[in-house]
Image (tube, helix red, strand yellow):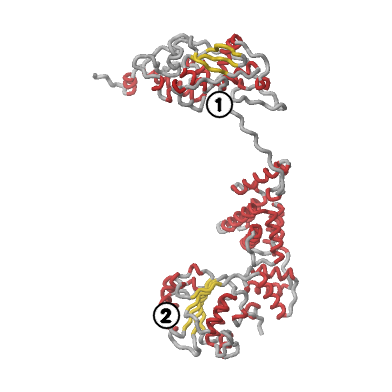
Amino acid sequence: MAYQSLYRRYRPQRFAEVVGQDNVTTALGNAVREQRTGHAYLFSGPRGTGKTSSARILAKALNCTDLHDGEPCGVCEACVAVEAGSSLDLFELDAASNNGVDAMRDLIAKASLGSPGRNKVYILDEVHMLTPAASNALLKTLEEPPPHVTFVLATTDPQKVLPTIRSRAQHYEFGLLNAAVLEAHVRDILGREEVELDDETIGYVVRRGSGSARDTLSALDQVLALGGRPTGGGSLDGLLDALVARDTGAAISALAAALDAGREPRLVGEELLGRLRDAFLLAAGGPVGQLPEDDRVRLAAVGRALGLPVLSRALEAIGTALTDMRQAPDARVPLEVALVRVTRPDTDSSLAALVERVAALEAALAAGVPAKSAAPASAAPASAAPAPAPAAPQSAASPVVPAADAPPMATMPPPVPSPAPAAGPSNGAPAGPPAAEARRRLQARQAGTAAASKPPPAPTPPAAVPTPTPTASAVPPAAHPAMAVPATAAAGGGDAPTKAEIDAVWEPLLATLTNATRARYKGGRFLDSDGPTAVFGLPNPFHLGRCQEKAGEVEQALAAHFGRRMPLRLEVDASAEGGGGGADPFSRRGAGQPGAPGLTDAPEDEEEDIGDVHALPSATDVGSTVLDRLLQAFPGAEVVE
């Protein structure tokens, strides 16, 4: 007699022999015993979980002449015919190959015919493969079949079955089998076959089954034919060890060994993805009932070693590699690249890899280990010392105080005398026509934008200007070679300079300031040196408010030159020309001129940080009037009126 595979030889013949599906078999047995069976059933679940076997047992029970508590006897003529596949009361149809509307019409035409037994049972396997036309053709008969007909529909994808079909049938779901149930089933069959296998080999068989009874028995057939568990590339333990050790070379070598053993890259990737998923679920505390105990212990250790962040990144990388294999010229390349990215986060530009690298650096700093020798974040001790608290932010008004062991800061270069202002009204250039004046203002605006990228804030009205405080608080000025403050200046060492000493160096210091600060402070003078505080006078409160914004830069320049901190106090110089009520030197329109608006009417954007206006070149490429420019643009034109 020809050899029969284990899953066929040990196919269940009674409801009690179906492994791991007690919820389904109990309901079907009770329905048969109480004669409450339905006219249509839908069995869904993964492959090899007992759907078709349960349908055949139901067909035997519906035609058995000697039922025992809802179970078929297995010895009567009807039971023997069903078991042998020669029963005229059981019709099995593969819907994957007979999925057309003609096959369904033929089935409906034969359903009304009688049969030798009490019930005629139709088993439609993979019913989700029916075409929409065939499914619709089956609907009416499925809803109201002949009294002696029972339909059993089996599928692995119930979501693809039409909702109208699902609503007409009793739906029973078959689930994957637990590892303990499968192991007991394997040991029972080994006892019947009088074969002994070690626990490691039985665990391998159960793991290969992945919760499917048929796949488990097929793997057991292979092991019995081989005489033991496959070795070499058949196992992915070496690949898992390489991932835990972050050894890129070992991971590539383990993958090559698996491929050299004859395994397909996609199958290796799918198995590795499944193992990493089990480790991820164990690390997260999720259920993994299909794992043997030895694999559960091993994968739990893998999950603890890698950690959830690394496992999630590995699942994403390998899952993406499996998707890319469909279009890759060589299916090995996407999987190899994924292994390199998992073991070497520095080669992965994803956000998860960057987070992992930052976590490794933080763990190394917390443990006092140099960053270049830091271990992966998952291997860092959980009880590492906390990172040092960040330094408190420094006030904007306080000068920068270097540490005692800091290197010496840059010294101020020798002052450069500023060019003497040219004589002439306002900016030293003769008053030109409106076009030339507009071009001159445009050049001044461009020069101010290059000097200070941040525009100054809106001017404060004279009535809202507060009384100046002894120490001005301002935003630290832009970086300048002359603005470096020595340590002695920050500490306030040395004697306070007199007003005469300040006046002697004021012009050179003014030349070192930024254009915006130099333009604002050029119209004032030092009134006194009140101990460590320098008193600076300005023509009016509006001018004082503008200079208050740049006081910090002037304090830095004075401190860098005199070697000590010099707070600056701004006051209105009553003796200045127009003091207290003069026009704003930064406004293009004088408030005291007839017909000109007051200080508060000046637009916000009229202040321009143009530096020394005497150094601006006069415009030479514009016409004297708008009319001249029109005549230049249209040669040959003449003025009519």
Q: Position of residue 316 (x, y in %)?
A: 59, 55
The quadrant of the picture occupied by the N terminus is: bottom right
- Give the residue at x 60% y 82%: 14
Q: Is residue 478 above or below residue 580?
A: below
Is residue 268 shown to the viewer in this render?
Answer: no
Q: Position of residue 100 (x, y in %)?
A: 44, 74
- Image check: 547 left or right of 206? left
Q: Amino acid at mark 2?
A: Glu
- Give the residue at x 53% y 81%: 31
Q: Amino acid at mark 1?
A: Val
- Image check: 577 left or right of 347? left
**Along the viewing direction, whichever of 218 and 516 lies nearer the viewer:** 516
Q: Is residue 74 above or below residue 433?
A: below
Q: Is residue 585 above or below residue 242?
A: above
Are there few (<14), some (14-19), or many (20+) residues within 10 Å of tag 1?
Answer: some
* Residue on which the image places disc 1: 475
**Disc with the residue nearer the chain's start (1 vs 2):** 2
Q: Position of residue 521 (x, y in %)?
A: 52, 16
* SS assignment at label 2: loop
Which image quadrant for residue 357? Answer: top right
The quadrant of the picture occupied by the C terminus is: top left
- Give the residue at x 59% y 16%: 533
Is residue 286 shown to the viewer in this render?
Answer: yes
Q: Position of residue 393 (x, y in %)?
A: 61, 32
How far apart marks 1 and 2 lie (CA) works out to 87 Å
* Residue on which the image places disc 2: 144
- Image check: 314 left or right of 631? right
